Amino acid sequence: MESQEQNNHNLSRGFLDRAIQLKIESKFTEAIDLIKKAIELNPYESLNFFHIGHCFHLQKNFDEAIHYYKIAIDLDPRDSSSFNNIGCCFEEKGLYEEAIANYSIAIRHNPKIFDIYMNRGDMKMKIGDYYGAISDYSVYQKNFATSPKVYLKRGLANLKADFKSKAYNDLKMAEGFGSKEATRIISVQNLSSFAPSASNNSYQRDRYSYQSLNQSIYQSNNYSYLNESSSNSQRNYHESIRYQNYSYLTRYFSLSELYKNAIKDSPRNNEIPNSNTNEINTTALKDKYIVITGTIPGMKRKEVEQLVKKAGGNIKGSITSATNLLIAGEDAGSKLNKARERSIQIIDIDELNSLIAVKSTIELLHLWSELDEKETYEKLKKESVSVEILKLLVKCNINKIRRAALTNKNITLDIFYKSSAFSDSTAKLCKFFLQKWGQF
């Protein structure tokens, strides 16, 4: 028989689910009544207090909303959504520094909610902290690379900070993604004269580099600066010097440096973990023709075929000039001899499992670090490559490798899958890369 506590929990959850639906329908008063019933049954569920706070928030009763959000935080101190919403309430009340403090705590607890960076950037603009705003907008831009609003906002922040070339670059990106407001601002502010020279490809590639800002005091998620005695102008001056001196430094490295640094920075740099053999890389054998011969120990022929198909491979019955791989078991016979004669790669079942298994980042880094420049380039051109490796190789100082990494199909998916413009055509994505990195 169900315990009374479990029964109360289920009833409370039922009230909350109905209240959320009423909230969606903008029936806030009815929703609040239902959530209060849920709280009576389960007073220790932070979600109840978050949603009742949100109802008051939507009614623009900000003080009551903050009250309930704080109760939710008392029950769940890492509730980043409640901290964010408290920040929104303070923003509505015109208390911008209090809003920034709560946005900062929300980011500290969950740095992957990128909208909070946008919120905090907006507040920093309100208090005249333009360099902090640029930093926050840059975090958002890195994850939503085709969002016109972030280029527009960062362009305005650069304009306020008197970085007119950067402002022009951002506003042109916003314009390219459909922002008419960006076009208007470029015209009104007469920014066209700050357009970079088309021949200066090094500048074009690096003009979106805000790396130094992302490492600034504003990205430490420490909001104690709100109580510092130094003025905004003093903070802005020092951050301005940092920004102007470092934001255009090149970010490219040799292949050996890239792998050395990446392996060193890995949390498990002292060991190479085994591949996760329970998970199959669905592109490991893509476009490859595979032949199976002999008896595979511990497995039926159809089971091996299913593994190959899951990894994207094509099963063939005989060795031909198109065959890429032979999986050999016991008593392999004539197919094994033919494969050897034609120099076709031959593997056993253990090697197959290793080949198709999803590999950890550190394992991939060690495998790729064994490749020379030519092998790296050929692999990038022919194969679907891990996003972690692609991200690394776009920092390579070898032009053709960086270009091959950018054009490998996985990188566009990684950059744009969260973007508001995910449905963009291939042509538009190509245009984005040309504008962002310059023509190679």
Image (cartoon, helix red, strand yellow):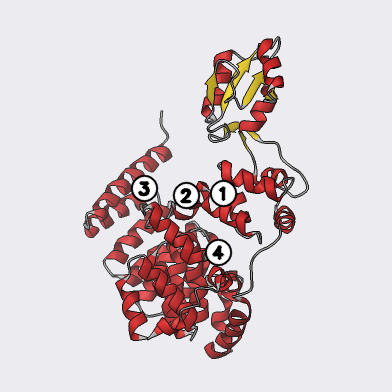
Identify the secondary structure beneath mark 3. helix
Residue type beneath disc 4: Arg
Residue type at mark 2? Leu
Could you classify mark 3 by the number of other residues whose Cα lies within 10 Å: few (under 14), some (14-19), or many (20 or more)?
some
In the rendered image, the vertical position of residue 334 relative to residue 220, given as above or below: above
Per the model, the C-alpha gap separating discs 2 and 4 is: 27 Å
How many residues crowd mark 2 within 10 Å: few (<14), some (14–19), many (20+)?
A: few
Residue 315 sits in quarter: top right
Q: How far is the residue under mark 4 from the one under mark 3?
A: 32 Å
Residue 387's label in the rendered image is 1
Between 39 and 65, the one lying in front of the other is: 65
**Splitting the image into 4 quarters, where does residue 319 fall?**
top right
In the displayed structure, does residue 355 sit left or right of residue 166? right
Instruction: Say which residue label 2 marks.
Output: 413
Nearest to viewer (mark 3 / mark 2): 2
| Secondary structure type for disc 1 | helix
Tell me the CA gap for discs 1 and 2: 9 Å
Q: Are marks 4 and 1 in contact (CB under 8 Å)?
A: no
* Whether residue 128 is visible: no
Looking at the rendered structure, the secondary structure element under dot 2 is: helix
- Left or right placement of residue 430 versus residue 33 in this view: right
Label 3 to label 2: alpha-carbon separation: 45 Å
Tell me if residue 58 can be seen: yes
Q: Residue at x 30, y 72 (%)?
A: 180
Residue nearest the observer in this picture, 87 or 415: 415
Question: Could you say which disc has been placed on residue 45 in the image?
Answer: none
Q: Is residue 74 above or below residue 156?
A: above
Q: Badge 4, how many Cα within 10 Å: few under 14, some, many 20+?
A: some
Q: What is the x, y in percent for residue 97?
A: 46, 79
Which comes before the other along the chain, label 2 or label 4? 4
The residue under label 3 is: 41
